[in-house]
Image (cartoon, rainbow, N blue to C red):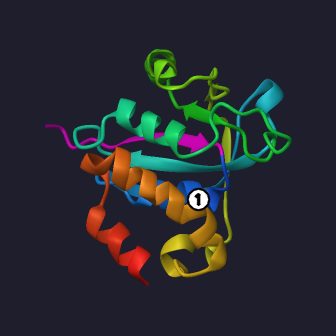
């Protein structure tokens, strides 16, 4: 075991939701909430998080599957520029791996995935006041309406990777 951390950035829904999902997983050591930009058509900033994780505990394929199942990864809606459905890679090796993972996971969905693999270009962190939003405010109506259902997906579909005690405690507040 190398205990080397990997990082990828993911986006697809609001960064409060995405941050809460990835903070709720074992093997995730840090989640940076903010805005990510790529290149070309994706050069504008879009809400996303950078996830630092231990692939020995949380394999990249599981992380990507969780991402796809906790946002609208098959829908092209009018807010896609603000909430770009993407996995941002930091190396060509990651790019190749992520493309293969997405191709494999397509079979879990009836509609085609709109999630793209994009090169990471730059990051702007969120204001400190809104980071760790869910775990500071689990009882807020926004959290109850949008984040609780995503955490329920974690518990139901990905329990082997869920930080069950952390999630359960937040849902009871």
- Residue 172, image quadrant: bottom left
Q: Residue at x 56, y 54 (%)?
A: 18
Q: Is residue 100 above or below residue 83?
A: above
- Where in the figure is residue 158, as x and y percent of width and height? 34, 45
Q: How many marks?
A: 1
**For residue 7, side relative to residue 55 (left or right):** right
**Label 1 packing within 10 angstroms: few (<14), some (14-19), many (20+):** many
Q: Is residue 21 above or below residue 83?
A: below
**For residue 20, side relative to residue 15 (left or right):** left
Q: Which residues are magenta?
A: 1-12
Residue situated furthest front in the rendering? 110
Q: Residue at x 46, y 24 (%)?
A: 94
Q: Nearer the viewer, residue 173 or 6?
A: 173
- Where in the figure is residue 100, as x and y percent of width and height? 45, 15
Task: Reply yes or no: does residue 8 show up in magenta.
Answer: yes
Image quadrant for the C terminus? bottom left
- Residue 146, image quadrant: bottom right
Q: Nearer the viewer, residue 159 or 38?
A: 159
Residue 27: in sight, yes or no? no
**For residue 161, side relative to residue 44 (left or right):** left
Image quadrant for the N terminus? top left
Q: Residue at x 30, y 42 (%)?
A: 58
- Where in the figure is residue 90, as x and y percent of width and height? 52, 31
Residue 94: in sight, yes or no? yes
Which residue is label 1 attached to? Answer: 17
- Where in the figure is residue 110, as x and y percent of width and height? 57, 23
Task: Reply yes or no: does residue 53 show up in magenta.
Answer: no
Q: Secondary structure at mark 1?
A: helix
């Amino acid at each position: 075991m190398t205990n080397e951390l990997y990082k990828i950035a993911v986006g697809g829904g609001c960064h409060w939701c995405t941050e809460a999902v990835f903070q709720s997983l074992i093997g995730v050591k840090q989640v940076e909430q903010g805005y990510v930009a790529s290149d070309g058509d994706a050069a504008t900033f879009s809400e996303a998080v950078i996830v630092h994780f231990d692939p020995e505990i949380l394999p990249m394929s599981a992380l990507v599957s969780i991402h796809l199942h906790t946002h609208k990864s098959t829908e092209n809606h009018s807010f896609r520029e603000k909430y770009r459905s993407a996995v941002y890679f930091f190396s060509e090796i990651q790019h190749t791996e992520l493309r293969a993972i997405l191709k494999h996971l397509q079979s879990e969905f009836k509609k085609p995935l709109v999630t793209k693999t994009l090169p990471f270009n730059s990051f702007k962190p969120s204001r400190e006041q809104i980071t760790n939003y869910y775990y500071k405010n689990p009882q807020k109506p926004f959290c109850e309406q949008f984040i609780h259902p995503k955490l329920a997906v974690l518990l139901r579909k990905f329990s082997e990777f869920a930080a069950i005690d952390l999630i359960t405690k937040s849902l009871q507040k």
